Amino acid sequence: MTPQAGVPTGVLTLSGEALRRQRGAERRCVELLEAEGFQLIHLPVLEYADGEPAAGYRFVDRAGRLLALRTDFTPLAARVLAPALAAGPLPLAVCYAGEVVRPQPARLRQLPELYQLGFERYGAGGDGVGVLALALRLLGVAGVPAARCHVTVSAAGLAEKLLAQLLEEPPDAELVELLRVRDLDGLGATVALGEPARAALEAALFGEDDTLWADFFGLREEVAGLAALRRAAEAAGASAGVDVAPRAAGEYYRGAMFSIWGRATRAILGGGGEYAVALPAGEVAAVGASIALGVALEEAG
Amino acid sequence: MTPQAGVPTGVLTLSGEALRRQRGAERRCVELLEAEGFQLIHLPVLEYADGEPAAGYRFVDRAGRLLALRTDFTPLAARVLAPALAAGPLPLAVCYAGEVVRPQPARLRQLPELYQLGFERYGAGGDGVGVLALALRLLGVAGVPAARCHVTVSAAGLAEKLLAQLLEEPPDAELVELLRVRDLDGLGATVALGEPARAALEAALFGEDDTLWADFFGLREEVAGLAALRRAAEAAGASAGVDVAPRAAGEYYRGAMFSIWGRATRAILGGGGEYAVALPAGEVAAVGASIALGVALEEAG
Amino acid sequence: MTPQAGVPTGVLTLSGEALRRQRGAERRCVELLEAEGFQLIHLPVLEYADGEPAAGYRFVDRAGRLLALRTDFTPLAARVLAPALAAGPLPLAVCYAGEVVRPQPARLRQLPELYQLGFERYGAGGDGVGVLALALRLLGVAGVPAARCHVTVSAAGLAEKLLAQLLEEPPDAELVELLRVRDLDGLGATVALGEPARAALEAALFGEDDTLWADFFGLREEVAGLAALRRAAEAAGASAGVDVAPRAAGEYYRGAMFSIWGRATRAILGGGGEYAVALPAGEVAAVGASIALGVALEEAG
Amino acid sequence: MTPQAGVPTGVLTLSGEALRRQRGAERRCVELLEAEGFQLIHLPVLEYADGEPAAGYRFVDRAGRLLALRTDFTPLAARVLAPALAAGPLPLAVCYAGEVVRPQPARLRQLPELYQLGFERYGAGGDGVGVLALALRLLGVAGVPAARCHVTVSAAGLAEKLLAQLLEEPPDAELVELLRVRDLDGLGATVALGEPARAALEAALFGEDDTLWADFFGLREEVAGLAALRRAAEAAGASAGVDVAPRAAGEYYRGAMFSIWGRATRAILGGGGEYAVALPAGEVAAVGASIALGVALEEAG
Amino acid sequence: MLTLALAKGRLLEPLAALAEARGLPLAGAIASAGRALVVEAGEIRVLLLKDADVPVYVEQGVADCGVVGLDQVLERGADVMRLLRFGFARCRLCLIARDGANVADDGRPLLLASKFPRLALQLAQRRGRHATVVPLAGSVELAARLGLADAVVDLVETGRTLRENGLHPVEEWLQVAPYLIANRAAFFLQGREMRALRRTLGG
Amino acid sequence: MLTLALAKGRLLEPLAALAEARGLPLAGAIASAGRALVVEAGEIRVLLLKDADVPVYVEQGVADCGVVGLDQVLERGADVMRLLRFGFARCRLCLIARDGANVADDGRPLLLASKFPRLALQLAQRRGRHATVVPLAGSVELAARLGLADAVVDLVETGRTLRENGLHPVEEWLQVAPYLIANRAAFFLQGREMRALRRTLGG
Amino acid sequence: MLTLALAKGRLLEPLAALAEARGLPLAGAIASAGRALVVEAGEIRVLLLKDADVPVYVEQGVADCGVVGLDQVLERGADVMRLLRFGFARCRLCLIARDGANVADDGRPLLLASKFPRLALQLAQRRGRHATVVPLAGSVELAARLGLADAVVDLVETGRTLRENGLHPVEEWLQVAPYLIANRAAFFLQGREMRALRRTLGG
Amino acid sequence: MLTLALAKGRLLEPLAALAEARGLPLAGAIASAGRALVVEAGEIRVLLLKDADVPVYVEQGVADCGVVGLDQVLERGADVMRLLRFGFARCRLCLIARDGANVADDGRPLLLASKFPRLALQLAQRRGRHATVVPLAGSVELAARLGLADAVVDLVETGRTLRENGLHPVEEWLQVAPYLIANRAAFFLQGREMRALRRTLGG
């Protein structure tokens, strides 16, 4: 047997001590989740990618359908469990662990293969606060105390709501992107901003006095929700702040959302939020979160 | 989030009791292998498929190279460990567990995704007998006692050697295939067979009196090797027989080879054998085996 | 040089007399179209296939975009000429010739590669009647007199309009398909049909007395348009009939549409119709037609 | 119809005067070749690419085979005509015209789609000299007089023969590449060169006194062949020189080879040479040449 | 002169009777056919074929029209016109399982055996069921009984064969009846003759 | 206790006769089967199937062994053992064309009709011929006669049916004989019983 | 203690002056740097880099924040926060061609040369123009003058260099100004220090 | 009249000196160039470019020949002729790491920073090393020092800059020297002038 020229660059190959630590952390996390009533499921490596944007490795299979390597467990779980969600009974709580493949990782050192471990709760009264608390406990079990975490809390569509107040027609993707990168001056050059509006937007973007922009943009209710999430993070021992225009991993979030950063690695250790699964028979409310186990172990040091 | 139309047919989705059993069996097997000195490694989902025959899902990546989902751990492990094998020190013993994807499963009920668990030993005096015994112990730990197993033992290239005696020029693939399906009459129609040759071939193909065909074809040494493998299987409590023309999973075997069948499922639970890894600096002898954990659990009932 | 194993099945390979006839016919057709003021253009073999349904050979290029071999000139011409259409001046009249590749040809003997020759007129008052007459003249020049042609005339969306009268909510694809295959009884089993409605539908589907169903479904204007097309075909010497639910080659037609059948080959020699090109700055009315030169030469005998 | 975002960059779109000139030139060239006894054939757009290096656009079709857009007519013609070559009678002389697609064109301005027009003669006593003369006549008919051409003549494997004299073991690809780019000093750093060898190599690489290196390397016969090709080019009115280590378009040439450069565009207008087609029943000698019509018309100005 | 493809199977007798009643002398021609596959019946040339082949001969225009069950038309995905649905020999294509077997959707793919592999897979997917289909040539009830597949998809008339084999229809997936089908080109190019034949048989 | 799958077709009678002569009471059991598909014949349970289904039942292990023509085994690509080739009912799979038709290789793909689409395509490609195959269920000779296909690939015994339809065999593509086939696992797990059956029928 | 990445190019002097005016002692530290690439300026550690590298150091978190032109941020596609746009050193990224050259859209791809190949291609595609871009390291005006490319995409301040080379700006494709950029993680994890620096420099 | 592309960098001065000594008046023309990018030097038109751009101008034929380091030719993958290797300004392209850092091959991909991303990746792969390369514009030694990358690939002359930054060369990956390069077409079409220039500079 003549082994050909190596493996695609950056594909995850682990052995010895590093692998033992990861399997140990995974077992402890799964035990915690099973104790909390989440049923472990094994999700497939391949998914149909017909409508998907060109994220992961895509290819055309023998029946001419577009297939992709899984890049994110949450939409995949919804698709595989759709029959069960339609049939019920609800609530249904599952957890999973395994590799997802993202060819362009944000951080240079990061491999395209990410070891993701997470949980989803469908059809329950579950909410962002409970899920955030559980995600922080998961990180704790993986060796990252909450004190080393900073949580950025947000609400899906918040940036769009802010802009809608300032413009007549619905905000296009470019303006939302300007909010995401906090380019207040850039926005001011494209959209006529009166002084009070500019000051309120500045307060929102740079995470100071929340009440000021909550009143100006009439978003008191959303901001109250954010405050509840912040208190939950701080109660668990982490620091927290509002991210009014997050770069969410998934486009599917609706309602509360959060990302958990590691102080040492300065990388995103995990995240989650509230979303809904649209089924022929109607919508099923859902909430979930996941942690990147490999990055978490790096943060744990 | 609107989940698209399901997951590719037959892709492995496990949950509840079935998944708990599989993770339990996997843990016990890995503990046994680690106790025997095999170091656990995590192998990548993707491999370059330049020279590979069109077995698994193949696709062209962004750099124009041909990639394939892993279909078999043994060649993948050799490729990933090539630097370590070249650098040494040897022997090196590793074990692994995970899914391989084979679009056309032999058995109808079988899913294209197979949960494979196995071990390889490089550069040691290791041989077929020791590996067969360990494979049977693995199946025992997974819940399948040796008594429910039947082992077919063979030697790579044995069918080719038999044919070489009967023909002048090297045997082509079609004749070897006729031996694989025991089509003695079909062979007789293509190759002139004297009566003694026909009788010896009949004994070899239908697994009766080994000494008869061993003498006729001058293969006493190979047949002695097969007998040692049979004794090892019978010593462990399994029944055993010679398969003079096996349909090996991998084309890379050289020397002893074996397959382990389950009496209830009548399916192949595992297999292994002796092979060599060709490196620029020279060849490294190797031996290994793997079991299909999902099928083994089906056999265990 | 060792030529590998042949060419994909059914790919067009022409030589000698057959190729000379085709190049002769193509030259005469292009000369006719150029005399009629159509400017010859050369269209690319490859086109982006992001939104396209999975028709032709599709693949993912190095930049990760989905590419497809051209399956139909009309949409490709619109895309390539979009800058010119936006800039104007209009009307713009172009003609083209070359292969399109359709992996699943309708007729068994037909090769997936089709030699298409056609013309499009953008932004003019052009209409179905003029284009039908020119298409029949093209076939004449290619050796197929109008007398050997049968023209089926239709109007885009006619079937949908018929169904809309019989149902409350908009008709789904399955009901339109039942009209396409004239399955009156099948339709009657799914949709409650009163006697007068059933009789009117029967007259429409089986192409008898047009005025009867025109009055019943209030489609006098559309049917008048169809009558004009029929007269144009008959004036040119061809027979003609109404096809109330055509299986159009392209989904893009809006308004008059027609297909030209050959009596000997009983195959579709060409077709065309009225459509519109949606550009950022607004819509450009367009009309065009094309003939399958290879099939036409088969009809010419 | 909403045309999507344009066509793949650099794909050939021609119209008006430019297309008229190209079709006129193509007709005149095909008439010349047909007069010279070459039968026009139409070659398919797609070819199997199993063994091919990753040159053109490659993709996996529905049967799992590797397909590629044609990048070069010569090997494609050999594959399509293999049955006819095996059956005979020989000689067989064909000519063809159409687009080939090369994603990485050498010259920046050049489009990946190249309009290639050429001819092949199989099984004849035909040779490089006759083919070179005919290629120059073709360029003349396309509007490029021989006086504006420079012909570089070479013999396949000549560079390898030179190196074989200087080294014990066969030359690897890297040394041949050093000859291709005339890196005499670079070669001198890797291979011990005595002074006479260095002087002879210098004369060969920089195209001065041919007899000097012919004698030194014992290649009098090959060099005589090159001289015949040079005289043929000069007789037709073009300038000519020896290229001892050409960057041939195709790897399949064996024996005489040549490239024709345009003085104004400084680009390769065409090329050809002697090669052989290996068929099961034995080898068929062949010779052929082709011109890049689009580039030739650019040179004609 | 129309060429009519007829299936030698269970449809032939009822069709011949109906044709005779409507003045179309099919029965006589068919009776006197013997081993011959092509017989003349007045103005009509009759081809006697296996029912699975009728849709192919009509779609490719070797026959202008034919009479065959909708199951065979859909199994072959033949692009043909359906001029007339007959009243006789109606039955139902059903999902059939062993008594006591559970074929509820649990996300795992269902292994089906059927003489209509393409149609069975289409109907399963339309109900959101993952399925792998084993094509069989006959007596699919045995496949369900002996566990070659989890369930079978087959035509059910009276249901007697099912009960004999300890099987029961789980779900009706498709109403099936014989149709008078026509080649698309013939439908347009021989419109008058087609309409006449339709009126004669449709009565 | 072995389960033996037999084809209800033309092989059954000669096989039953040979078995009786070798002391295996198949004939009696088969005769008394009536509509039943499963009968006991001494130590052997017999399944009576369509011949195209025998390779599937044996490959999937629902039957331990079976008797069927090599054409059906190759058409299904079944991975089974071929224990014994029988002497009776031998025939040849041939490329068959209309008298006077030209099927020489001119580079253009050959349109073939056959009851063995997969095997016909394989055999055509092994001879370097490009071919497209139309699967048919029966009487393929009509397809050649009426021009549905350029040629057909079918079993030829006496060649009488061909001559009746103005056809002739162009090339013999495969020798075909009935085989005793066995499931791979059963071959190893029930070695002794398999060898005994082989000796009995092989004599 | 914040790490600030500064570009050694034309932005350094105006930035140092503005910082001094706002009580941030950058000028002194930079002046005394000599060949050193890392200097301390009070509470801030300064990295002196090529301007194209500033977005990389900030995106990867080696620097917490930096000052560099928007052109460099977009060329690198760096995912960084843009805290503040400065008033000095503003210019325009333009499509530039030789006087008299025609760069109207005729469907054929436009050959562009630029120091910002990724950004130039993006801006061309946003205007529906097909383009191929030749990446160059410097003095792109020569590429337009000598016909290496049909046109160039470069920063224009006064336009003097263009006129000297017989070139003219055809279209303005992007307003460009220097920005104070910040690493995403640092923006959240060192919020207070970031806001302080922004107020100091933003004034 | 040959057009010669020269790099304004560290090669210009030693080349001008060598040319003067061989009777080629480059030095005077270059000195008097001022901001101009195109100067005449006797029979030769000189283009003054960034060294990374010399291979592009020569490969595309805007310049007939040029003088630039082999590193720039290989980084751009320019298909040009290498007429002459100069003796001056030779250096080595090395893998460089922080003192004490371990860059042994442990199967995990190596993160490299370099001004020659394409060449660095090629050289790493030729040594069987998996690597990801971060392209940088300058002072790559800082990238190694501050841990932006595991190691850097850069030109080493004396090694003084490395020692100042606590770095050391791990392996020499490529000998680099300036070359007289020529456009392929010009090499054939202007053979005589090319040989003359080669002799003058090669002496």
Image (spheres, coloured by chain):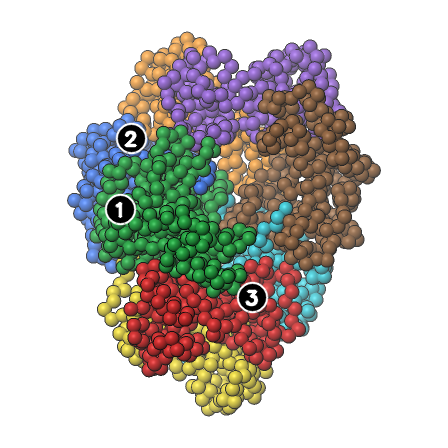
Chain colours: A green, B blue, C brown, D cyan, E purple, F orange, G red, H yellow
Can residue C288 be seen from the camera position used here? yes
How busy is the neighbourhood of tag 1: few (under 14 within 10 Å), some, or many (20 plus)?
many
Residue topped by disc 2: B298
Can residue B180 be seen from the camera position used here? no
Q: Are marks 1 and 2 in contact (CB under 8 Å)?
A: no
- Distance from Cα at disc 2 to Cα at disc 3: 65 Å
Disc 2 residue type (three-letter): Glu
Q: Which circle marks residue G173 in the picture?
A: 3
Q: Secondary structure at mark 3?
A: strand
Question: Which residue is drawn at the image coordinates 23% and 57% (left, top)?
Answer: A301
Quadrant into which the N terminus of chain G falls: bottom left
Q: Secondary structure at mark 1?
A: helix
Question: Relative to B225, is H138 on the left or the right?
Answer: right
Q: Chain of mark 1?
A: A
User: In front: mark 1 or mark 2?
Assistant: 1
Give percent across and percent down for residue A32.
24, 41
Q: Chain of mark 2?
A: B
Q: Which circle marks residue A138 in the picture?
A: 1
Task: Work out whether residue E181 or residue D144 is closer to the camera in this orientation and state it.
Answer: E181
Give percent across and percent down for residue F69.
45, 25
- Distance from Cα at disc 1 to Cα at disc 3: 49 Å
